[in-house]
Amino acid sequence: MAGTGVFADILDGDVYKYYADGEWKNSSSGKSVAIINPTTRKTQYKVQACTQEEVNKVMDSAKTAQKSWAKTPLWKRAELLHKAAAILKEHKAPIAECLVKEIAKPAKDAVTEVVRSGDLVSYTAEEGVRILGEGKFLVSDSFPGNQRTKYCLSSKIPLGVILAIPPFNYPVNLAVSKIAPALIAGNSLVLKPPTQGAVSALHMVHCFHLAGFPKGLISCVTGKGSEIGDFLTMHPGVNCISFTGGDTGIAISKKAGMIPLQMELGGKDACIVLEDADLDLVAANIIKGGFSYSGQRCTAVKVILVMESVADVLVEKVKEKVAKLTVGAPEDDCDITPVVSESSANFIEGLVKDAKEKGAKFCQEYKRDGNLIWPLLLDNVRPDMRIAWEEPFGPVLPVIRINSVEEGIHHCNASNFGLQGCVFTKDVNKAILISDAMETGTVQINSAPARGPDHFPFQGLKDSGIGSQGVTNSINMMTKMKTTVINLPTPSYTMG
Ligand code: NAP
């Protein structure tokens, strides 16, 4: 159970502690932040509201701990990460329980998130050993005017202190996708978990604590992003920010200093359906892609652009499948569970009302109870409706009927987002041309957008992000090149 057994140390009364200097602590603020269970809409947990002074201390210890961590052999860093991964998987049940209560993630998906996170940590340890164990050797005589008098040795060195800020929808997975690359590369890590999801994240951090990482190397400060966020992101002790979330990331990018940024932001992933597509495959992918975790995924299908000639058949097939989705509590492992907050549900309702006023065709009756919104397919959506462009982050999916492929590509590219997209057709040549024309970080051919497998490159264009993730890219991003040049007194040629 959460907060008990090996996790008893992280809880004091009814408030979860924050993690600094290898210890679980109460904030001197004496204040806590309530985490509302999206299903019951009552306070489920409380976390410390950390102060600026506490953030300063964490940054100081992170800086000190990083210096000796960078001197720790790579294989040893990997060994500790493997250990943390095993402990994380061993304790999947209490962590999954928190995900169910804090963010209403369906019970099975919650367990999957923790197991996938353990796998990600292990994979990152292995990949780090491989790619950080390699450098580059250059000789000077390949550049005009030079003899072979200079040998250049390059290797990757850590950046220093990495600030990791994940979003509510994958508070464990999107935290470890930042923590593991940071640590294997020799950095220290300060985590600011999302408020909804903070307790799951604190349990995950405790698994790293149990694995025996050095004091101060990993810290976790809690509190509302709106209150401590700016202080953290503009802190002079931070050498890199890895952020996943919504438009907040755009504001952070403008405020952050001259440090590397990894930003994974929102998306409006389009699903382009051609006349020759396998419509059963499309319908299955729309259900999985559009409605998994009630549409609260960055890579959810967020707009369907279907050729008019096959639209009626496709809409009918999707409708049949929507009718079979179970709606209810995450504990019962329902397909559709309450969205994360009341304000999120109100925002989704605003998009639905706007579509209704402007004449969208409702394939199901709009139904809401508290934060629970029943799955809804909106047909005949037009570009003047907000739902055509905005990210609902809920179980509401618009269908725009198109008369040409160009129209579909145009809609996709007119979006301010460019995370992923997908195209369904049996003609692979057409699919490649469409993929090349779509201004998104990734295009899936004949499958819904997806972030994983976690070692694939993952990036957004335009307002969807800066930089690229995926295990290898994240490790590289959290390092910089260091070169040493050996100057020889006379040119030296191999075997010469
Ligand atoms: P969000 O509101 O932007 O919050 C993300 C994180 O930022 C949370 O930890 C939040 O903390 C923190 N935060 C808030 N204000 C801050 C500030 N001023 N400075 C620093 N941090 C601050 O996003 P969300 O609602 O959690 O997640 C949904 C969004 O994330 C969607 O737009 C979705 O598309 C996007 N997302 C993108 C990806 C991707 O890979 N591209 C993946 C998943 C989700 P608090 O919770 O305490 O406010």
Image: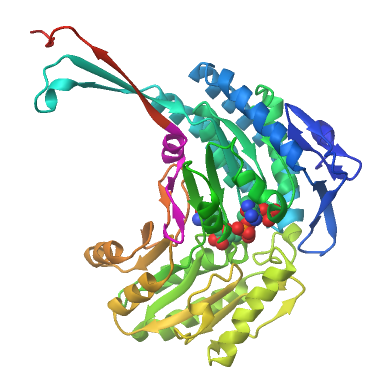
From the viewer's perspective, is 270 left or right of 359? left
Which image quadrant: the N terminus? top right
Q: Position of residue 427 (x, y in %)?
A: 25, 67
- Looking at the picture, the colour scheme in use is rainbow
Q: Report the label total.
A: 0
Q: Quadrant of residue 313?
A: bottom left
Residue at position x 75%, y 38% in the image = 53
Judge by depth and name the residue closer to the eye, 317 or 165.
Answer: 165
Residue 188 vertical placement versus 44 (above, below): above
Against 260, is 66 above or below? Answer: above
**Residue 462 included in the magenta stretch of the image:** yes
Quarter occupied by residue 48: top right
| Residue 116 place in picture, x, y as percent | 57, 43
Q: Is residue 90 visible?
A: no
Up/down of 410 relative to 169, above or below = below
Of residue 207 and residue 185, the one placed in the foreground of this image is 185
Question: Within the displayed image, which quadrant is ligand 1 positioned in?
Answer: bottom right
The C terminus - image quarter: top left
Q: Which residues are magenta?
A: 461-479
Q: Nearer the viewer, residue 235 or 391?
A: 235
Task: From the top left corner, tell me how far across and down residue 135 is, in percent.
Answer: 33, 23
Coordinates of residue 174 in the picture (x, y in percent): 58, 46
Q: Residue at x 55, y 74 (%)?
A: 321
Up the image or down, 393 lies above or below 401; here it is: above
Res. 420 image quadrant? bottom left
Could one spot residue 457 in this view of the protein? yes
In the rendered image, residue 254 lying in the magenta stretch gets the answer no
- 270 and 428: which is toward the camera: 270
- The residue positioned farthest toward the right in the image shown: 13
Q: Residue at x 53, y 75 (%)?
A: 397
Q: Residue at x 59, y 45 (%)?
A: 234
